[in-house]
Amino acid sequence: MDALDSAAADLDPLGPLRDPLEPGFDVYLTGTVFLDIIFTGLDSAPVRGTESWARGMGSSPGGVANMATALARLGLRTSLAAAFGDDHYGEYCWDALEQGEGIDLSSSRTVPGWHSPVTVSMAYEGERTMVSHGHEAPPPAGPGPFPQCPPRTRA
């Protein structure tokens, strides 16, 4: 067990209850991952034909990644099957989920030539307006490298 595995085990709220024979994951999710770009601190709602400036902005993986991130942060061992574009947005989302959140992506794939779906959200006075763009990911070509898909999970 390396230092990263040891640290993860120390943070596992279910660790004392786990049986070594139980599945490697608590939950398995599948769906579409978006790059979410969120603008905050707007002085007014966006008006057609004008430019609006925001005082704040953030970005993160969105779509099904929101649920996967929440479950992983609650301490559940989370596996996600999703398509990722081979663009910078896809790379960012993959790294943020796998490295940043500790989500297993062994059942996910990068799709050559497919660009990642994107959602831009503008928050104003407790409401939000969203604009999204994306295309359905093409089906996997061939059997894929997924010998045990879906993996055994608790849920």
Image (cartoon, rainbow, N blue to C red):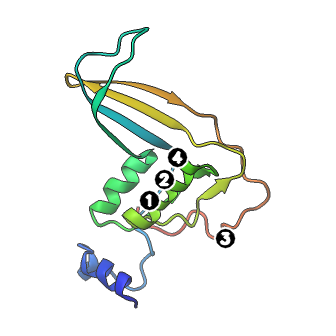
Q: For numbered disc 1, what is the local secondary structure?
A: helix
Task: Residue at 72% x, 53% y: name it.
Answer: 140
**Label 4 or label 1, whichever comes before in sequence order:** 4
Quadrant in the rendering for residue 13? bottom left
Q: Which quadrant does the C terminus fall into? A: bottom left
**Mark 4 or 1: the one toward you:** 1
**Label 4 or label 3, whichever comes before in sequence order:** 4
Q: Vertically, is 129 above or below 33?
A: above
Task: Residue at 76% x, 61% y: name it.
Answer: 143
Which mark identifies residue 51? Answer: none
What is the CA distance from the residue labelled 2 to the residue labelled 4?
14 Å
Q: Residues within 10 Å of mark 4 (few under 14, many from 20)?
A: few
**Label 2 or label 3, whichever comes before in sequence order:** 2
Q: Amino acid at mark 1?
A: Leu
Q: For numbered disc 3, what is the local secondary structure?
A: loop
Residue nearer the viewer, 128 or 73:
128
Q: Which residue is mark 1?
A: 97
Q: Which residue is mark 2?
A: 93
What is the CA distance from the residue labelled 1 to the residue labelled 3?
22 Å
Which mark identifies residue 31? Answer: 4
**Label 2 or label 4, whichever comes before in sequence order:** 4
